[in-house]
Image: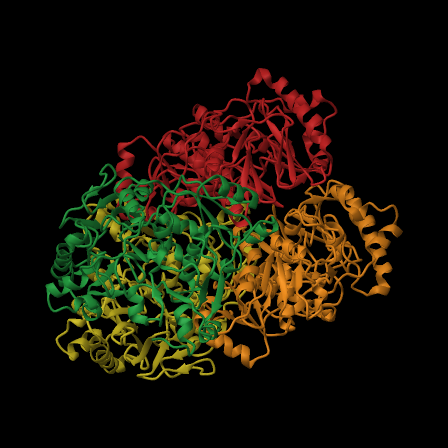
Chain colours: A green, B red, C yellow, D orange
Amino acid sequence: MLFKKIKSEGLAHFSYIVGDGSEAAVIDPRRDIEDYLNVVKNEGFSIKHIFETHRNEDYLAGSYELALKTGAQIWHADDIFDYEYGKPVQDGQTFSLGGLTLEALHTPGHTPGSFSYVLYTYSGEPWIVFSGDALFAGDVGRVDFLGEDKLKETGGKLYDSIYNRILPLGDEVILCPAHGSGSVCASAIAGRDWTTIGLEKKLNPQLQHDSKEAFVEDIAKMLEYSPYFKKMEEFNVKKGPMTSNLKDPQPLKPEKFAQIRKERDLEIIDCRMVESFASAHIPGAISIWSEGLSSFAGWFVDPDSEILLVTEGEYPEKEIIYLRRMGFDNICGYLGGGMVHWHMSGRDTESVTTVTVQELCNILDENEDVFLLDIRSEDEIASEGEIENAVNIHLTQLPDNYSRIPENKRVYIFCGSGLRSMVAGSLLKKQNYNNTVVVLGGLEGWTSTTCPIK
Amino acid sequence: MLFKKIKSEGLAHFSYIVGDGSEAAVIDPRRDIEDYLNVVKNEGFSIKHIFETHRNEDYLAGSYELALKTGAQIWHADDIFDYEYGKPVQDGQTFSLGGLTLEALHTPGHTPGSFSYVLYTYSGEPWIVFSGDALFAGDVGRVDFLGEDKLKETGGKLYDSIYNRILPLGDEVILCPAHGSGSVCASAIAGRDWTTIGLEKKLNPQLQHDSKEAFVEDIAKMLEYSPYFKKMEEFNVKKGPMTSNLKDPQPLKPEKFAQIRKERDLEIIDCRMVESFASAHIPGAISIWSEGLSSFAGWFVDPDSEILLVTEGEYPEKEIIYLRRMGFDNICGYLGGGMVHWHMSGRDTESVTTVTVQELCNILDENEDVFLLDIRSEDEIASEGEIENAVNIHLTQLPDNYSRIPENKRVYIFCGSGLRSMVAGSLLKKQNYNNTVVVLGGLEGWTSTTCPIK
Amino acid sequence: MLFKKIKSEGLAHFSYIVGDGSEAAVIDPRRDIEDYLNVVKNEGFSIKHIFETHRNEDYLAGSYELALKTGAQIWHADDIFDYEYGKPVQDGQTFSLGGLTLEALHTPGHTPGSFSYVLYTYSGEPWIVFSGDALFAGDVGRVDFLGEDKLKETGGKLYDSIYNRILPLGDEVILCPAHGSGSVCASAIAGRDWTTIGLEKKLNPQLQHDSKEAFVEDIAKMLEYSPYFKKMEEFNVKKGPMTSNLKDPQPLKPEKFAQIRKERDLEIIDCRMVESFASAHIPGAISIWSEGLSSFAGWFVDPDSEILLVTEGEYPEKEIIYLRRMGFDNICGYLGGGMVHWHMSGRDTESVTTVTVQELCNILDENEDVFLLDIRSEDEIASEGEIENAVNIHLTQLPDNYSRIPENKRVYIFCGSGLRSMVAGSLLKKQNYNNTVVVLGGLEGWTSTTCPIK
Amino acid sequence: MLFKKIKSEGLAHFSYIVGDGSEAAVIDPRRDIEDYLNVVKNEGFSIKHIFETHRNEDYLAGSYELALKTGAQIWHADDIFDYEYGKPVQDGQTFSLGGLTLEALHTPGHTPGSFSYVLYTYSGEPWIVFSGDALFAGDVGRVDFLGEDKLKETGGKLYDSIYNRILPLGDEVILCPAHGSGSVCASAIAGRDWTTIGLEKKLNPQLQHDSKEAFVEDIAKMLEYSPYFKKMEEFNVKKGPMTSNLKDPQPLKPEKFAQIRKERDLEIIDCRMVESFASAHIPGAISIWSEGLSSFAGWFVDPDSEILLVTEGEYPEKEIIYLRRMGFDNICGYLGGGMVHWHMSGRDTESVTTVTVQELCNILDENEDVFLLDIRSEDEIASEGEIENAVNIHLTQLPDNYSRIPENKRVYIFCGSGLRSMVAGSLLKKQNYNNTVVVLGGLEGWTSTTCPIK
């Protein structure tokens, strides 16, 4: 028996390979498919089926490219696909993998045509359920994609899917959702990457409601919708662009980098950590540290725009993968040799002021008239605590709220750890705010000292 | 400075990456380009140029695919290319790589438009010459591709290229040819993979002639021409098929394998070692051990035919690379789990008798009327010794000479080591010879005992 | 959260890495510890604890070497250890890993001091239980290590451990045992590598008994005890030899190989597949195919003896790992270049006759007086069917039963697939049986044809 | 034939593997021997000999550990070794590797007992010479290790070694020295990593002298002697500590990191790039960027001291290798999660001011009374140009010259690129200079603008 969970950091996306005999299936493949291919090569399996639990909105599926490489059949959920390259899956349809059987289970709610897939043991008992974005560890899928007026309806469908189709499979059944903690596909997925139906019944807050009405009431809410979602939905229903023919981004000398930046309207993403960006960065660059790309590039960079990358000098292997998973295919190069070569070419840089929480304590004691900007989300504020006198604008909403930030005051930016604050800092810099200060360590640093929180 | 030799075993092909600053060039890239891409990624280089020393006949160049991935410019030698994807190089043309300069040197002979490329030191002295198939370690390029009537002319051109253009660069210049020992592009390339012009002047037998006439006399001869060469020449002047979109051969269960074999007219290549094939193989399979594919698949398998592979059970990673380098793209699968699964499915197998040299000695002493078939090449026989009473048919000529082999006698097949003998054994088996015996250890085993050699 | 299962093929051994924050623990590390070290390096974790579920008898634990490399604390179960390098774990003892807690649970039976370890969720519910050799998927641990007269007592203890300590954790708890299907630590572990307590309550045959008595009755039996177990037990309670200082086995030329074999009393293990060994092998070699080493080297090779290996020519990386896991540290080399070099040196080989099941059908029809030797285990025969007229001697018992095998008859050897038959064939060859025949495809091949089974 | 150059970045050290048949030799192995072992495993070779060209002073040889792993014989040059583990090589001694022969050539000068090794072709001509630290590309070995009063004598010996033993081998012979550009074992090794004797005769400035006297006059000078050299010399003549048993440095939480730093007198090396260190670093840390460790850790860190590392968060794989090559074995951990976790723990940091060259131009125009500190070497200043009004103290001499740097002025630190300036900046910070400024881009940045150089 073959069973592997492939985790995509950043997106917090889980895909799975499951197989028996020499026949395997992949559930919800991501766009970079090498890991699936290597597993089956090493284990002597052939991928027979590719199952999608739903049209995804937060990443580009690798279904078509994987099918081309292996000859597998794609089974689409949600009936809106370009069926030249796959077939629609049907409720109750079964599939054999060696001696095992998988069954498709229609579990709408997150999307109208969402499916779960149940793997049965050799003797026919429900064993593992791949629940897509219906049921997660600690949360359920968001139901707001069809709009606010459909919230009650989609919420009700999700309730039925979970309570009537998934939970009855049994407490002992292993639950394999499509996302883990950190995903944008639910509010608050828990950190337990491995779980069972029984554990969720005990621990998942959304499964503790007294009634369907209470459940729907709780989950029927609009969540943030990242601008790149729209493109993902489009790409995923069509064949989508293939990665195997994309050009590798090349290292660019400072002169070339500067020239391209001047000639073309493109985005520079600086993927270095906050301290590096603070000291010196190329004017106009946005700061998104590497591990933050999956969460924030989609908010602040147009998926169709050309992109130049800055790293500490190395080839941006990881960064390219993260960006391509989200459809950012126009990466035209990176700064070869890193910033030291930029400096050596005598070119201009800019900086962003930082402050440690200890320094900030002293400053605040001096009663300077400052503006405290808290860019954390409502959920974070609720669970971690508010900052006294701070104005809250969630990072993702910043571009729509520049007018709320004064230009004539020193602006201290807070997040949880200081990482996102520099994203905000770089956005404000591009809006000509020259008096912003990133608080290193963020709220967690702040609470480690003796400064007061309301 | 970046300088790497990438050796392709089997084809005995050498390609090179050379670079300075952050600019690199690849000389004569092979079809599987991952190694080049990885080197430049790790070293922070960008591939600016791709140089071809000539249209190649023994492998598929990776120029186009590499250009697509990197944006490099292809520079073709021999003026017969599809110039949508590259440009013709000119004699004397120079190219910069960081602080270094490369110069194109027209060195015809092997092909009419062959080029060498000279890398100069920072101060302008000739440093390294990439001589393509003009000058090798221990040999010179073959000159028979234009036909027998042009031999003198092409031989003369090669003499001029070597004596007037390459050797004058200086004894101290490092010589980097396109092939090493074992290549079919010359008769007898030496085993010294690293050499200099001075070493060749001392040691290369073809550079010891007294006159141009003697040189031409010696080298102007027709060599064997493998059937797949024609296809390579065609593919290399066009864009050629891309590997990145080829389907991965899948493991096939015995039933499926048997069914495909029955329905379609295809070739089964068994890549296992001689002992395995001897014991039990799928009826109709040709035996070519993995490391022999580059040399022999081109002779006995049509590049357009569909292929099924048999290995010891593992994924045929290496075998697929070897075959694709030669344009064998229709590999439709391999026997999943290896022969043990074939046996477990209760299917038929065939075997080929083997004999150790010690057993053979005894047999020959008994004066049985046997047929000794020596499948080594003329060159090998000349250098390693003849076998008494053996009939010589070089392996590559076997299909044209079945009539010379008796059907009613026991046929003992000899090569150098016993590897190629099984290729012959499998070919004869397909011709319904059922009385063939492969001599394990071949001539080398034979000479290790006290049996007589004429 | 970090959670990885590391599977050791052959031994069918599972070890686990679990962690939170930056603190990790390894449960039952195997001897080759690179995988653990790489996981924690890549994930930014530090191994704080090493937990042993019991003194192992089937493999060498890597606890000490892992502790030396990481500074982790070893927690031994079974109170017989050299406590210079570890500490005894106590029932109920708890350990923190970041925000998670692990609790030690005394679960005797398989060994007197066996422990399970329960991982709790952040909110304190039982989540995952590492059950060692107490409870497996589809089976329970063997209880015969203290001898036949203690069977009832140990069986009773195991019942209490499972029923009073493990099962009450809850159906929804994920069960992580120390072995999977194919292990010698139980009779018949199931193929479902991932399971839960609830699934086992449903599916595990040993958990379907009506009473403690019935349970004990069923499991209280003596199983086979491989001779190397004794050495493993000894090594595991002491520090045990370190692998990092072991010499790498070197390739040996045929002359050197032959010389060593002549001078020293050592074992040649030929790891090639059955067909290769059949055709030609070095006289005196035992045939154990690579994937069979973990199961059979311990039965037929003394762990203290010197070993020479034969492969198809490649470095025996995998084979060395398999052998070292079982304490075979005296591997003094392998045949460089494989058998082709042996043949080329003109040396002697031997062969073993094979037969396909189709050929065998014909032979049996001819009513020749043959001896059918079935070397499968009693369990296999019970589940897969008996062979008419065959004498059954389980492979592991063969050395004690040579007298039951006639020397003057042709002996046809059967196993499931033909792999083990060659082990038997090579053992009989060493006993001077020259009339043995290995049945390719074994019983599975046999049943695929129309030949009769009783 | 097997021939590979293994380059150790940082140390600019070259070692070589050469082999034929299945026998290989390693020349001057570095301490981390995995690359050698992997090459021979993959290629089917056995390491028969380990040749040292001299007792090394700049790195720890891996000879003993490699011998232990492979059974190879160590051949020491310089007759001061612990001969329990190796043998002294003799002038003229020959060694066979398959069909090839290597000859030891006594070539004193760099050290009294330095040896070169000549590899001959199959037909007996000199082919490749491994010249150790006698002759490099573009330079010759330093001769100052025996002290100033022996300079003429050692210089003369080196002349004889080069002119009477190495150069006569022939222009066409490939030259393989033990170091490349950037090594501390000579003044100015050239960037051409591949060379021949003929190329050196043409291009090496030290081979252009008219007489032995002129040669000696030019090269007989004292060079810088890094404090760790002494330890390397000692370790290399003894068995030296083994790496295989060293503990892996573990990630440390900020609390633990801070606690260890407080309790023990140890060094914190911050390996991040200059911009990161500038913004925020742990008080007391020395800045040495990763690729600078090989050159500078030996100057500013005692090889016996305990070390804590700071990176951008990842496991310091490369940094540990670099440090261990130089004998820094007491690396007790690294900051887990990087500086962001330090900030989140609310702990103190310090910063170093930086300035771009453009900003500096403006500042200098304002005629502020500043101190320009140029930390480049004399050679660099000679070749790249002096900075007007700057005081020159080579970085390595800084600790002996703090008194020359004013405490009451702003100190602008210059190097070539800005990397080394931060090393100086961090050293001055530890001396309580709080008014230092690192010039980003260094002299190269400076000369890219229009600011004046004298």
Residue B387 or B232: which is nearer the viewer?
B232
Quadrant housing the N terminus of chain D = top right
At x 27%, y 75%, the residue is C123
Asked if residue C204 shows in the view, the reply is no
Residue A430 percent coordinates (x, y):
44, 52
Tell me: residue C234, above or below residue A175. Answer: below
Tell me: residue B394, above or below residue C293. Answer: above
Residue C113 is drawn in which quadrant? bottom left
Residue A14 percent coordinates (x, y):
30, 56
Asked if residue D5 shows in the view, the reply is yes
Residue D183 or D411: which is nearer the viewer?
D411
Q: Is residue C289 rendered to the left or right of residue C333? A: left
Residue B256 is drawn in which quadrant? top left
Tell me: residue B122, above or below residue D29. Answer: above
Q: Is residue C369 rendered to the left or right of residue D241? A: left
Residue D387 percent coordinates (x, y):
72, 54
Count every numbered label the image shows and give the total. 0
Residue C369 or A4: which is nearer the viewer?
A4
Residue B219 percent coordinates (x, y):
64, 24
At x 71%, y 68%, the residue is D405
